[in-house]
Amino acid sequence: MGIFNFHKNTFKHGLHPPEHKGETNGLPIRQFSFAPMMILPVAQHLGSPSEIVVREGQEVVRGQLIAKATGYVSVPLHAPVSGTVRKIANVPTISGKMVSGIYLQTFPYSGQEVLEGTPIDVETATKEEILKGIQDAGIVGLGGAAFPTHVKLKVPEGKTCEVLIINGIECEPYLTTDHRVMLEQADDIFMGIKYLLKVTGAKRVIIGIEANKQDAADHLEKKLPTDLPISVKVVPVKYPQGAEKMLITAILGREVPSGGLPIEVNAVVVNVATTAEIGRLLPHGRGIQERVITITGPGVKKKGNYLIPVGTPLRYVLEQVGAAENISEVYMGGPMMGVAVSNLDISIVKGTSGIVVFTENEIKKQEKVYPCIKCGACVDACPISLNPSKLGILAKFEAYDQMAEDYHLMDCFECGSCSYVCPSHIPLVQYFRLSKSIVRKRKATKQPA
């Protein structure tokens, strides 16, 4: 495991956890079966939850609007299947909270055709019409953040987007969804880039891909449209290079300032799967109903990359792929930045990029947490040069003001590198997540942190 910067075209620090991508990166995307009952929480994105616009007992068609956006930082929700709204009630989520949601019973003999909408013509549509079309399609960041894409693409007044970066890095261990999307959905990606170029005003596009996906880089380079200013950039493999600030440093050599956004350095970064969805949905005026997800890990028998309807219960997914009897942990997302689930009755949401299943054979018993020995491993690993050791100590003493103001806590994007290398087994990233939530909550209520 390396933690130092021996390569150009990358960022300082970071690490090299085992990749575990070989079992699925060669498996093509397959359509997943439709669960008998879909569970659809309305809070599937950052910002305001959607507002339900259907009633119990109502029959809906696949692709139909079932929950509308409730503001600018919000997106609608569309029916992932044709079926009947059986119940509107609280549903479980990965956070442990119960939120408002819809239980949608699938029509067992339906052909599940997708409802067509009003197409957005990339040649004639204005920037505002494209942004509205992206919002109306319910598109959020599919790399895991689930931030409404139309908000991210809105270039603030006085700012300029010089370069659009399409993020095909996918540095998270086990996950190969973006890899397969680049190999199988190139036309959708390039169509999505057309929309993105028009809405951001970018002069050029760079598709960033890690060296362990050379086949995807070669494939996209062969299909590059001659009428678009697109290039493909292959960068060394390192975690967490998929974080947008790290990718900007690796590709452009620019550093996003503390507390700033990519537009501060004249860049916009969009995940490659999100780009493909824009290119797939907007020409038909459709809403997103499904996404590609990697299902893998030692506890899975039928590993692969699957196109799964949003709302599919996790328990149903595991039944279909054949889970081992001695399952110990199930992660939504990857093992570094994903979350271990406590309830198999939660469902696939728009931000679910992977499901990784571990058995008792791979999971060690809870390691004893020892005091920090100030070895500096976490400092060497942190990609944004924070001091996780000091932050961890301050978190124990609930010194949230000092963490946020003096040690830049809010710049942490919770990559987990510090926890991964800590010889004392201190759950640093968990401390930081809790601390950040407290800072945000108290800031919102204007209390001292």
Image (tube, rainbow, N blue to C red):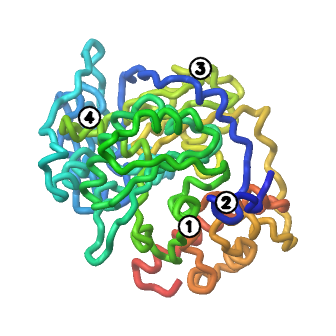
Q: Is residue 42 above or below residue 24?
A: below
Q: Is residue 429 above or below residue 58?
A: below
Q: Indicate the position of residue 138 as horizontal and vertical percent values.
A: 28, 46
Which residue is the site of mark 1? 253
Marks 2 and 1, Cα distance to the nearest angstrom? 10 Å
Residue farthest to the front?
A: 226
Marks 4/3: CA–CA distance: 27 Å
Q: Nearer the viewer, mark 1 or mark 3?
A: 1
Q: Is residue 35 shown left or right of residue 314? A: left
Mark 2 to mark 4 CA distance (whole Å): 46 Å
Look at discs 4 and 1 and give the one toward the viewer. Answer: 1
- Label ID, residue 79: 4
**Sequence-wise, which precedes: disc 1 or disc 3?**
1
Q: Residue at x 48, y 50 (%)?
A: 167
Image coordinates of residue 19 in percent, x first then y, are: 69, 40
Q: Nearer the observer, disc 2 or disc 3?
A: 2
Q: In the rendering, at what x and y percent does residue 104 appear? A: 29, 31
Q: Earlier in the sequence, mark 4 or mark 3?
A: 4
The tag on residue 379 is: none
N-terminal-most mark, 4 or 1: 4
Q: In the image, what residue type sits under mark 2? A: Lys
* Foreground pick, 383 / 320: 383
Give me the C-alpha separation between circle 1 and circle 3.
41 Å
SS assignment at label 4: loop
CA gap, disc 2 to disc 3? 38 Å
Q: Which residue is mark 3?
A: 302
Q: Secondary structure at mark 3?
A: loop
Q: Residue at x 62, y 58 (%)?
A: 9
